[in-house]
Image (cartoon, helix red, strand yellow):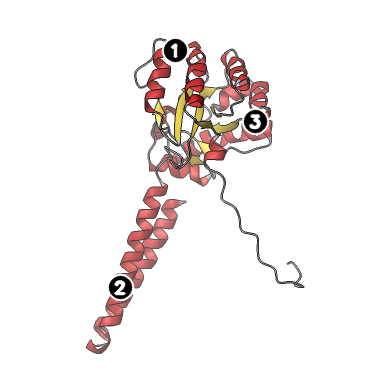
Amino acid sequence: MQKSRKRFYTTHCLAATVKITLNNFTQGPKIKAKPLVAAFFFFCLYALAGSAIAQETKPLTQGSDSIRAVALTFDDGPHKWHTPDLLETLREWNIKASFFVVGRCVAENPLLLQKIHKEGHCIANHSWSHPDMTSLSREEQAEEIKFCNQVVEALTGQRPRFFRPPGGRWNPDVVETAADQDLLAVLWTVNGYDVPPKEPGQLAELILRRVTLGAIVLLHDGGAVTLEALPIIIERLLSEGYIFVTLDQMFPPRITPVPFVRAGASVP
Ligand SMILES: [Zn+2]
């Protein structure tokens, strides 16, 4: 999507700039100033469009820092043994989180996915088979994302809005492929696994030291260390006044404006 838009800006703005400049030279010195101003304007427009598009091709890593909120995210599930325990802990604390699920694991544990959904958590796409997305062609990337979307939608009736590339390996093609399927690429602010934690207290401390306002915390759905660290993390952050939000709450969908209809006019 972004590449085609960038091509559009490139083609049209540069073509207009060249045309205006040529006109300037063919029409004589009297009207030099206005076309040069216009040419400058088009160059600026192109530069602005280009920089805006460049920002769109980066994954999100943090929510707003104006609210004392944090989003817990769990990758790689659903897992037959660990997910039920994880859901129970979240239920005990009345906390909603976001689950980046792997399509293949969803197919193996469909009831668990429905349970995650029914308990009000956000379900997000973590590919079909957890490959290194940067090593795939655009078509293969699209299939990985599409198959995961399809299995989630078939089981929950809802299409995911977020995509996290496995292992956090991404390039602009990966982000664009996700965007083509209306998914926002999301990484994280805090990764507790930079150094593999050996025990729950160590993982909890690694995370708590780095949490800031609007942080997205990377955890995994599948591990005793994570399960035991979770209550420590939740308790401390609650005591510090944080609220826990899902990614849907952190990045709400844009509101589509309702068309204005004059009084007495018929709606088309
Ligand atoms: Zn993963």
State the residue position of label 2.
39
Dot 2 amino acid type:
Ala
State the residue position of label 1.
200
SS for callout 1: helix
- Distance in Å between CA atoms under marks 1 and 3: 26 Å
**Mark closer to the chain start, 1 or 3:** 3
Q: Is residue 255 above or below residue 112?
A: below
Say which mark, if any, is on residue 66: none
Q: Position of residue 25 (x, y in %)?
A: 24, 82
Circle 3: is it few (<14), some (14-19), or many (20+) Cα within 10 Å? few
Say which mark, if any, is on residue 120: 3
Q: Position of residue 169 (x, y in %)?
A: 39, 32
Q: Position of residue 205 (x, y in %)?
A: 39, 18
Circle 2: is it few (<14), some (14-19), or many (20+) Cα within 10 Å? many
User: In the picture, residue 106 is in which quadrant?
Assistant: top right
- Distance in Å between CA atoms under marks 3 and 2: 53 Å
Circle 1: is it few (<14), some (14-19), or many (20+) Cα within 10 Å? some
In percent of the image, x 59 and y 35: which residue is there? 149
Q: Point out the frontmost of discs 1 and 2.
A: 1
Task: Give left or right: position of 37 versus 118.
Answer: left
Q: Quadrant of the C terminus?
A: bottom right
Q: In this view of the protein, can residue 258 be seen by the observer?
A: yes
**Mark closer to the chain start, 1 or 2:** 2
Q: Point out the frontmost of discs 3 and 2.
A: 3
Q: Is residue 27 above or below residue 201?
A: below
In percent of the image, x 74 and y 71: which residue is there? 263
**Mark closer to the chain start, 3 or 2:** 2
- Distance in Å between CA atoms under marks 1 and 2: 61 Å
Q: In this view of the protein, can residue 165 be seen by the observer?
A: no
Dot 1 amino acid type:
Pro
Dot 3 amino acid type:
Gly
Q: Is residue 136 above or below residue 8?
A: above
